[in-house]
Amino acid sequence: MEVVRTTATHATITISRKDLGFLKSSINEILEVLNNSQLHTRTGVTTDRAEALLRELSVICKTMDSHK
């Protein structure tokens, strides 16, 4: 992973397909074992937001896969 740019609220990065897949799998595993309350307590994120992020990562992975 390489940091391209950061601001107080955003970071622009480049990430390998392998690392992106790992991130996606990690979020998926977390969603399988933690309920909404546990997830929010441990991360400050709701299940809805984690699921939305997982969907966004899936779209990115599919787009990357289409370049093969």
Image: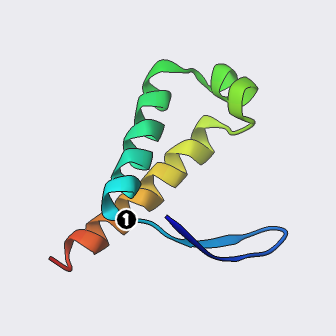
Is 14 left, or right, of 36 in this rendering? left
Give how far across and how far down residue 25 sits, in percent.
37, 41
Q: Which residue is mark 1?
A: 16
The quadrant in which residue 26 appears is: top left
Q: Amino acid at mark 1?
A: Ser
Among the 4 quarters of the image, the one containing residue 38: top right
Q: Position of residue 34 (x, y in %)?
A: 54, 21
Question: How many dots with numbers?
Answer: 1
Residue placed furthest toward the front: 2
Q: What residue do we see at 53% from left, 52% from top? A: 52
Q: Nearer the viewer, residue 36 or 60?
A: 60
Q: Is 38 on the left or on the right of 19, as rendered?
A: right
Q: Residue 68 at x, y = what percent?
A: 14, 76
Determine crowd level at label 1: few under 14, some 14-19, many 20+ residues with C-alpha closer than 10 A. Answer: few
Q: Residue at x 37, y 65 (%)?
A: 16
Q: Is residue 43 left or right of residue 22?
A: right
Q: How is the image coloured?
A: rainbow
65 vs 49: above or below: below
In the image, residue 19 above or below residue 29: below
Above-or-below relation of 59 to 44: below
Q: Give the residue displayed 43% in from the left and 58% down from the top.
A: 57
Residue for point 73% across, 70% down:
10
Q: What secondary structure is found at the residue carrying circle 1?
A: loop
Residue 43 lies, in percent from the top left, at: 70, 34
Drawn side of residue 61 relative to residue 30, left or right: left
Vertical relation: 32 (above or below) 24: above
Q: Quadrant of residue 47?
A: top right
Q: Residue furthest right?
A: 8
